[in-house]
Image (spheres, grey):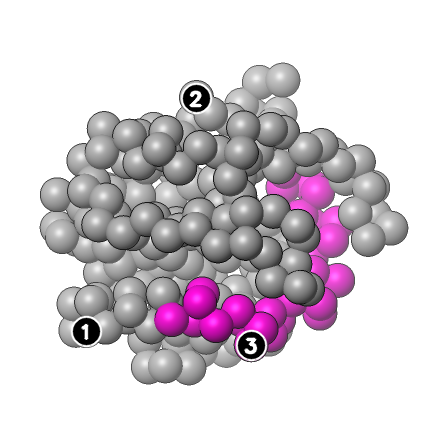
Amino acid sequence: MGDHDHHNSVRRSYDAVAEEYAARLHDELAGKPLDRALLASLLEQTEAGTVVADLGCGPGHVAAWLADKGARTVAIDLSAGMIEAGRRRFADVEFREGDLLELPAKDSEFGSAVAFYTIIHLDPGDLHRAFEEAGRVLRPSGLLLLSFHIDEEVLHRDEWWGHEVDIDFRFFDPARIADLLKAAGFTVEMHMERTHYEHEVATRRAYLLARRG
């Protein structure tokens, strides 16, 4: 499958589940204390007055949490359905439709960025380009907070909550992601792992905090 077809498949799949996804997960951070702590740390280290980007935002609940803490946020997602669901729910967040490989943002527009479980839908060959693009839209010394599932497997789904989808979920080795971030001009400052919470899918998760050079 080519890049264009792959991205269209991801877009269509998330469009199909957008409303149910938003309804089910709009307050998921309430049950994720470590995620909240990392987001709070990101905000504390973000240059005052700059914007925080939520890359691969889904319906925007992470961006909305950040906005509730006083941040100016821009939420970007490939899925128009997710963007529409987010706009209806979170008036304090600016939403933009766009691709991780070609972000709809100016150079150095953001003070920091978060990408929770976003790279899991990228082909491995696209990761370097995605990290370079994240670096482009961050200010010098801006921070990127990533999360993803740990392993080296690919899970495919053709059904999700009763909706027909065609989507892969890729798991990654944290050391490999750290190497790719360094190759894209970032310095990895933090690497944390945790097991799943009781209400989550049973995977081990990694968090990397990386600073743009």
Label number found at residue 30 = 3
Q: Earlier in the sequence, mark 2 or mark 1?
A: 1
The amino acid type found where label 1 is placed reads Gly
Question: Residue 83's image quarter?
Answer: bottom right
Nearer to me, 145 or 107: 145
Q: Secondary structure at mark 2?
A: helix
Q: Secondary structure at mark 3?
A: helix
Query: Residue 52: x and y, percent?
Result: 31, 64
> Which residue bears the numbered disc 1?
49
- Looking at the rendering, the stretch of residues picked out in magenta corresponds to 10-37
Query: Residue 102: x and y, percent?
Result: 38, 37
Assign the magenta stretch its main secondary structure: helix
For the point 63% across and 17% down, which residue is it? 1
The amino acid type found where label 3 is placed reads Ala
Residue 112 visible from this viewpoint: yes
User: In the rendered image of this protein, does residue 126 appear above or below residue 67?
Assistant: above
In this rendering, position of residue 203 left or right of residue 16: left
Task: Classify mark 3: residues with Cα within 10 Å, few (<14), some (14-19) or many (20+).
Answer: few
